[in-house]
Image (cartoon, coloured by chain):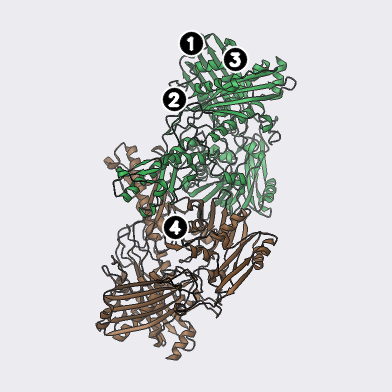
Chain colours: A green, B brown
Amino acid sequence: MTTAPKPKYKVIGTRPIRHDGADKVTGRAKYGADIKLSGMLYAAMLRSPHAHANIKKIDTSKAEKLPGVRAVVTSKDIPEQGDRIVELGEGAVNMRHLASNVLAREKVNYRGHAVAAVAADNIHIAEEACKLIEVEYEVLAPVMDVIEAMKPGALVINPDVKDENGKPTNVAKTFCFEKGDVAKGFAAADVVIEKEFRTATVHQGYIEPHNATVHWNNDGKVTVWMSTQGTFSARQQTAELHRIPISDVKVIPMEIGGGFGGKISVYLPPVAAALSKKTGKPVKLVMDRAAVFEATGPTPGSVMKVKIGAKKDGSLVAGEAWVAFEAGGYPGSPIGMGCMCVFACYDIPNAKVDGFDVCVNRPRTNAYRAPGSTQVAFAVESIIDEICEKLKLDPIEFRLKNGSQEGTRRVDGPVFPRIGMKETVQAIKDSDHWRQPLNGKNRGRGVATGFWFNCGLKSAASATVNPDGTVSLLEGSTDIGGSRTAIAMQLAETLGIKAEEVKPSVVDTDSVGYTDVTGGSRVTFATGIAAIEAGKDIINQLKERAAIIWECDAGQVRYEDGSVHGPKGVSLTFKQLADKLHHTGGAVIGRGTSSEATQGGAFGTHAVDVEVDPETGKVTILRYTVAQDAGTAIHPSYVEGQFTGGAVQGIGWALNEEYWYDTNGTMRNSTYLDYRIPTCYDLPKIETIIVEVPDPQHPFGVRGVGEVPIVPPPAAIANAIHQAIGVRMTELPMSPPRVMKAILSK
Amino acid sequence: MTTAPKPKYKVIGTRPIRHDGADKVTGRAKYGADIKLSGMLYAAMLRSPHAHANIKKIDTSKAEKLPGVRAVVTSKDIPEQGDRIVELGEGAVNMRHLASNVLAREKVNYRGHAVAAVAADNIHIAEEACKLIEVEYEVLAPVMDVIEAMKPGALVINPDVKDENGKPTNVAKTFCFEKGDVAKGFAAADVVIEKEFRTATVHQGYIEPHNATVHWNNDGKVTVWMSTQGTFSARQQTAELHRIPISDVKVIPMEIGGGFGGKISVYLPPVAAALSKKTGKPVKLVMDRAAVFEATGPTPGSVMKVKIGAKKDGSLVAGEAWVAFEAGGYPGSPIGMGCMCVFACYDIPNAKVDGFDVCVNRPRTNAYRAPGSTQVAFAVESIIDEICEKLKLDPIEFRLKNGSQEGTRRVDGPVFPRIGMKETVQAIKDSDHWRQPLNGKNRGRGVATGFWFNCGLKSAASATVNPDGTVSLLEGSTDIGGSRTAIAMQLAETLGIKAEEVKPSVVDTDSVGYTDVTGGSRVTFATGIAAIEAGKDIINQLKERAAIIWECDAGQVRYEDGSVHGPKGVSLTFKQLADKLHHTGGAVIGRGTSSEATQGGAFGTHAVDVEVDPETGKVTILRYTVAQDAGTAIHPSYVEGQFTGGAVQGIGWALNEEYWYDTNGTMRNSTYLDYRIPTCYDLPKIETIIVEVPDPQHPFGVRGVGEVPIVPPPAAIANAIHQAIGVRMTELPMSPPRVMKAILSK
């Protein structure tokens, strides 16, 4: 369902079969674990059994003597990094922390922290050898909770992390954004709601574990095969960690079985590289599920205190948020982004946000779909719902009244360009779902809105015209959600040919211009622009070729509707001209980049009907509708897929998912049997409404769609639960025990 | 040794380590036979035991029933081609003949001709199944000799090949070139020598057999892994034979273990494709050595009648040549090129050439290093030597007097631009070799000159700048002789960076613009131009980026010596600027093509000292020197490598190599034990002199060097043998039995 009229596109908005479809459905697509190279060694890692400990000594001698073991590496095999901060496309990284996270140096900061790795003739020997490595630990008390970690006198996890007075601290970073006069704002409010919220540590839950196969060649050139969200980022992190030139590393992207933000940081390639350097052979390293849970970056658990004030007429006057995110074992949670998102859905004249990035003895957190936004939306959208309740206002009308729009200034400064926040609310209001009454006992309906910036960053593409009138497209964005086709469609639209006539390839770091990570909902937007630019470059050259054929000036040739048109009515279709390139100068290669464009941000509003079992506290989702602004939906099926997938992940986060730690800081549910992600048995079909308010920053109006749909679910479900049984849930997940507890305390 | 002064280059003329060196010397480089894919099937071929037969019936039913057999294909599985002629970059091809050569249709035209193929779970089952295929042949008399084949009434091999009267014939093509008045020329001659020469069928002798692994995917997309001299040509031939769009085929080039012209035609990919289409699995097909000899294209054996006249003063006045080449089982010998080369070394005012492409029951011939030129040089250079003998002229002085030079018109029309024929003669004259007297019994010294056009054709390249100041280069020319480095050096020279700072990759047909075959000594020339153009494209963009940084106009920026220079003395090195690209517009991608440039042609003059054993007829090479015009030697080691390798192949052709057929048309020496290519035991170190007369058609003056060095050896050795023992050899190879026979007949 599309809500806005749009320009007449021929390819955009259609639903061609994805170019990689046959490979994906037949199982022929190659993922990282499918790699097998001649002479390849298999590696295993020794991981810390303690959540917090000093490493006194590592003795690898017994492991090295085990027959079949080819090399053992520890942190000594990764060069010292000092205090270097390296700029990656997706942000700066502290190399000391990155190196220590990859292989622990003086300390282990979380259970599962990598301590050593072994390469051997087979995986069994490698695993056996890991058991022979003797590590002398001085076990420390684990610091698991954000509030505890922030207390003065708390055991400090990273001694090099210091406060403004130079005193070691667990609070790695503090943010403060403010606009207007918050005190004055609250003074003018008729109703003020203030609450504390907590969300659990939650994993992205991708199916494919992290993997890397690395060959450090005799000439110093390093090849990495891996599934990653960013080949160029992985290249840079691997090269910087080993202190070798970037261009000595080539990253070959394998297909990726899910990432959601979790496959941006590198864990394995630098370790496999160290093993390969020592052995001269390719080394393959694949995580098991427990390692994925325990040692890769989940999204931070959080503690949030949020206070919002409104007038009786329903106008928001002030907001205040105190937000502390788990950083994990090293600094770097998406707290800054959380702070920027917290009030972004509303035009609040007076607002203040304080944010804290807090080290705890959990895995170093990482991006997960709209990083930081889901947490803060849970708090803010719950309070908004309560304000509506108090003021007896319709939550839809409230949002239509107070929602952000073009010209609204965010608490962190920027002013929104054209956005579609209210249009998504209106779409829910107009939806069949919203119009149908919800009957039945213990049932409730909730609504919530979510925001994500959407990144621009840098992309490149190049494309060559084939003599049969097709175009081969090279791109550097690894394809997680169908972006091969979404990018190809934009090139096809530009050239006036069919989507099927563009043949896209995701290629290695030597074969395409620098391209930032697949993340931040940026690929269809920015790599799309690069492909459009490559298309324009092709068109310019085609005009010149036609001018040669027609013996006229290139200025006399125009390109329209997939054909060149010359003087006196002569014309050639793209296909006809493609066939003549051999004799007019050879190959036509188009190139394009995107680097300056930024996105206007995207919004989604979700409606959910739930039924709560008062006997068990189990929440059943009865109906779920996502309305989100896609700007322009390039391939509506993929847009719907993102809406659906994001909503489902948000539902899992809302109802079931959490890291269960025991008192020693050991995760007790690090398998998919115990860590409950939703399955099709838990869910109705997610209904989707594609709202299209074109982003003026993109030639076709694209807005990234991947992040936003995970943001509203926890809040929407919490609001629905309240309507169903009259309790306000303030802690995620809203699992049966927690809901039962809330029912009982009521 | 370099004879001419040259411009001051920084990279060109140096000898950096080849970029693929480590992979090659450690055995890590992947050749076609190294491919192993999951679910891959292994294929074997049934080949004809007869040199000439009609196929009455093929029964594959027993083979199909053998457990483990997955598919059997015959010519029925390759679509009918009709009378289509398809233009490949390297020339036109008759699709009916190509298809029939790939899998015999109504007839087998040579022993070893492919008849059927089997794909099975392993190669043993596939080979076993081939034996179960029942073919009913009507055996015909083999037509093995060119002269016999040309006779009226000879059994016609290809009924569709007809003469001008529409009568079936074995003479597939006739050429006639003429300039001046030949009769008048001969009338003015004081000495006329006329002789008949024969050369044997000779194989290129590459080490790596042909191979192809093909996967015909469920979506109709076909991927081919193979070692080939031309990925785009292989793509086109495979696609055209299967009547599918070119862009549905992707050819991934594996490393190539020698080609020399023999790995341009396709043999296996269309067959493996048919098997993969039937089975849905990747299918691997690798030839054994016997198949390589019996069923891939050797260079044609020839019969030549050549007559040359000169005046007493040593000036050439007339030449006449009648040249018949074996085409093999289907038309298409390089007879045209032979006719163009025959008199190309000399400025002969009156000349005429008749050429004939003659079908015989031998494998369809193919290109082999300077196709056609070695044969005719053997004839012409032998006669020139005899003229010098008769006129008591020094053969060096004779060549300096009569040699072609700028302005000389070839018998086939074109007028030479600047060339270095006489410079190579002078280089031999000035060489230590020529100046040292040759003493000893049965010893002789010979000299001969050779020519090859050198092709231009089409190439493309693209290149991206890395943030660390290196450049990744993509090219489509498969690398047989070090061209990765030779092309990278030209890009490096253009950009003013080091050869090691360019990282070249030979990529698949989807990843680079259309590029013609690696052959005709064109790669360093034409792909070099494409890389230079890509470099210029990069420079233009770098100027724009510097202008952004310096806030000036791009026109105010100049690029010099690896740096951008702006107003008021500001400058940035390539490396410094590369580091700033992220913030000035993202990736810089350069693209370049070459399509119009043609080469001026290249010449080489060889001197050889031999000793003939009068008891056995064995000829021992005592000393051998190659002087050849390389235009500008990009990487002198590779130039010397081509000189040496070509000379060695020419020596093998001269002394030992030949296809030995029995009366049934069966080759009796189809192994490297019996087909004698020279080894290091047979040869002295080949001395090389790089002459540099820059080709004005190339920015750096490059002339291709791969072909010419094979041309002079047979003639030079024949001339040396004559000086040693006084006999004129007129048949190749000049093997001990033939030399003994000549000695005895004297």
**Front position in the image: B323 or A56:** B323
- State the separation of the CA atoms marked 2 and 4: 49 Å
Mark number, residue A386:
3
Q: Secondary structure at mark 2?
A: loop
Q: Is residue A301 visible?
A: yes
- Give the labeled residue for mark 4: B477
Residue A554 shown left or right of residue A723 in the figure: left
Q: Chain of mark 2?
A: A
Task: Tell me where residue B222 appears, x and y as whole percent.
Answer: 54, 53
Q: Chain of mark 4?
A: B
Find residue B77 and report its image quarter. Answer: bottom right
Mark 4 or mark 1, which is nearer to you? 4
Q: Chain of mark 3?
A: A
- Give the labeled residue for mark 1: A184
Name the amino acid type tagged 2.
Arg
Task: Tell me where residue B452 appears, x and y as whole percent.
Answer: 37, 68
Q: Residues within 10 Å of mark 3 (few under 14, many from 20)?
A: some
Q: Are marks 1 and 2 in contact (CB under 8 Å)?
A: no
- State the separation of the CA atoms marked 1 and 2: 29 Å
- State the separation of the CA atoms marked 4 and 1: 72 Å
Name the amino acid type tagged 1.
Lys
